[in-house]
Image (spheres, rainbow, N blue to C red):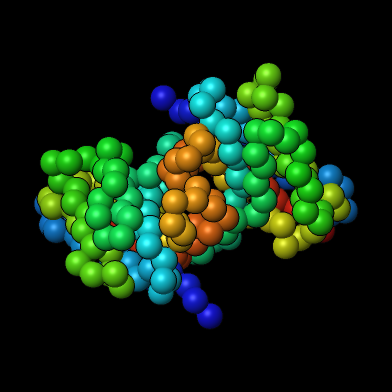
Amino acid sequence: DQQVKQNSPSLSVQEGRISILNCDYTNSMFDYFLWYKKYPAEGPTFLISISSIKDKNEDGRFTVFLNKSAKHLSLHIVPSQPGDSAVYFCAASAYGNEKLTFGTGTRLTIIP
Amino acid sequence: DARVTQTPRHKVTEMGQEVTMRCQPILGHNTVFWYRQTMMQGLELLAYFRNRAPLDDSGMPKDRFSAEMPDATLATLKIQPSEPRDSAVYFCASGLVAGSTSFTYNEQFFGPGTRLTVL
């Protein structure tokens, strides 16, 4: 039972354009969402997060949008750079619980 | 430069053999997580510890997997006997829970992983 779903295994985007990565969840108890970025042969690193009391959080080129009614979040990267090529994992947690439920990841490739 | 370390980085073994993976969390972190990454399931939480005590190991196959923290600087994940379906990348992560405040998720730092291949 995959409670956090990333339905696009891969995505290719031209350098300088916008990258949009999507994530859906099924558990209504989730109220905190995170995106992690992973390079080959390295562990995931935290990128950006959002609480369910917000619908948008921005950090430089990265913005996460949350649509609670649709149980959907997305990560926007603008403008996309070659160094953004990585696997991106969406993760979610229920309030007060440090356990994270991860999606299967989306491999983003930025084309120069 | 504080980071989580994991050994070995790669392990190839034959079915039925015992495998032990080790993790050194970041000094001062009191929470340690073990994850497994597979293509089909993504990152699955296997078990985690707070102050060396196991809090949740519900994600771990109990019959063959075991996780321990012999001391604050070492966490181990053992598979005995190993099977081909255990082939995956195993990550350790550590973080800090300060007092009774809620966990700060961006403080969960991952190690580089152990790539396990069971033939």
Q: Position of residue A40 (x, y in %)?
A: 54, 61
State the image coordinates of residue A69 (x, y, percent, origin top left): 68, 19
Q: Is residue B55 left or right of residue B65?
A: right
Q: Residue at x 31, y 60 (%)?
A: B51
Image position of A17 with respect to A39: above or below:
above
Q: Let me know if residue A27 appears in the view.
A: yes
* Residue that lies at the very extreme toward the bottom in this rendered image: B1
Q: Nearer the viewer, residue A3 or B8?
A: A3
Closer-to-camera residue (B43/B68):
B68
- From this viewpoint, which residue is outermost toward the front? B100
Q: Is residue B57 above or below residue B92?
A: above
Q: Is residue A106 left or right of residue B102?
A: right
Where's residue A16, x and y in %? 87, 53
Depth check: give the residue in front, B19 or B76.
B76
Please report the residue visible at 33 percent of the width from the left and 67 percent of the height from the top.
Answer: B23
In the rendered image, the quadrant that contains the C terminus of chain A is bottom right
Q: Residue furthest top?
A: A69
Q: Residue at x 43, y 36 (%)?
A: B40
Q: Is residue A13 above or below residue B72?
A: above
Task: Locate residue B75: give its quadrant.
Answer: bottom left
